[in-house]
Image: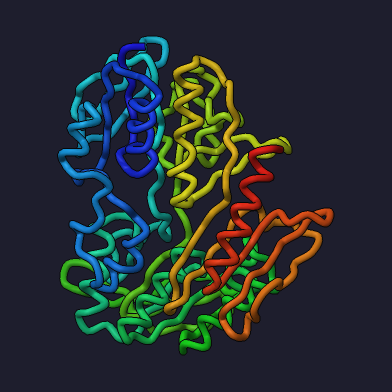
Amino acid sequence: MRTMTVVGASLAGVNSVQQLRQQGFDGRIVVVGEETHRPYDRPPLSKALLAGRADVDDLWLCDEEDQDELGAEWRLGVRAEQLDPAAGRVRLSDGAEIDTDGVVIATGGRARRLPGIEDMRGLHTVRTIEDALALRAELTGGAGEVVVVGAGWIGAEIASTCHELGLRVTLVESGEVPLSRTLGDAMGSVFAALHTDHGVSLRCRSRVSGLTNVADGDGRRVTGVWLDDGTQLPADVVVMGVGIQPVTEWLAGSGVAVDDGVLCDPGCVTELPSVVAVGDVARYRTATGGTVRHEHWNNAAEQSATAIRNLLAGSTIEHYRPSGYVWSDQYGVRLQIAGELHQPDEVEVVDGSPSDRRFVVAYRRSGETVGVLAMNNPKLFIRMRKQLAGRLATS
């Protein structure tokens, strides 16, 4: 293999370039990125950058010197529009074509929005630098009422940041409690109290049925949110935090299977051995036969090592073993999880107390700890996380 093309220039893409070099690939590497910025870190978008505690220059994953050391060609501000595996070619939105021996798909996703109202002023998502800066300008420009739709990690962090900025916040969640699918109802209730204790209004078991708006210049501006029970919430700003839509449309006709992401085997390899997928876009098969796609920083950081090893080998010689590590900062507390928290037989508080906002919870299956959740208790969490990682490495 003499040329590798990495499509996607965020964390998973940059790590793939680094892994190619670390694992001995000395050929040509081309990196294609839709955004004009050099690669940057996304977690601060909903926290430090949005709150004004960080600048854009604090977000770069690598500086120009680091990029030069990787010896890659950076095609930024263009999209990949077609993959032709038979010809070994990637066609770009500017008309250029890249002849390539292998492809790493690291395109991530675009923030989901309510359909049909993409251009309404006051309606925001947070996925890019421009998104965060535009939202910050509104939040600090006289907004009073903010409605955040979705109480997952991103929605909760945005609600926390809005609260930090002194705004009145309503958080709308379709589930019974926040994060119930990840943490279960009992621990989800703890996170519900974290919001309400800080004065955030939480509306669970609620879905958005529409938006109210008024004429604003040449367009419309949001003024409120209708819920499915008929409630109307006033809003100067509405933020959608309901996940992403994987960027896969450019793969149509390529032979690469997609279904809410790029379908991969346990080693992140697609049906084409010369094509692998990493990060938010990769939906890989698990040991139990199901498929999973993660939208977390650590997954994007970890996955490329396995994917690149298999890509260079020309077949799947290693399976990806996720750590399941996720962290979040909300209302001044650090939240951390590791391992598998879904479908436990037992959930036990092993240290501290949820009411004190400092605790560690063990998630067990068949008597064995398979996952850990902690709030403001990093020391014990790190020890238990290491124990989980040790069992994972020997399983």
**Residue 13 placement (x, y as % from top left):** 35, 37
Residue 254: x %, y % from top left: 44, 21
Tell me the residue at 48%/29% (across/down): 307
Describe residue 185's horizontal placement relative to residue 336 as left or right. right
Residue 326 drawn above or below residue 140: above
To which quarter of the image does residue 146 belong? bottom left
Depth check: give the residue in front, 149 or 368: 368
View extreme (right): residue: 366
Which residue: 27% across, 82% down? 143
Position of the C terminus, as image quadrant, is: top right
- Nearer the observer, 311 or 68: 68
Left or right, 304 with respect to 270, comes to: left
Is residue 249 visible to the viewer in this orientation of the structure?
A: yes
Image quadrant occupied by the N terminus: top left
The picture quadrant where one finds residue 73 is: top left
Image x and y of residue 345, in percent: 81, 60
Residue 12: horizontal and vertical position, in percent? 39, 40
- Name the residue: 66% across, 53% down: 340
**Looking at the image, can residue 220 be seen?**
no
- Residue nearest the observer in this picture, 25 or 143: 25
How many dots with numbers? 0
Going 38% across and 58% down the picture, which residue do you hit?
116
Q: As displayed, is residue 50 above or below residue 105? A: below
Give the image's coloring scheme: rainbow
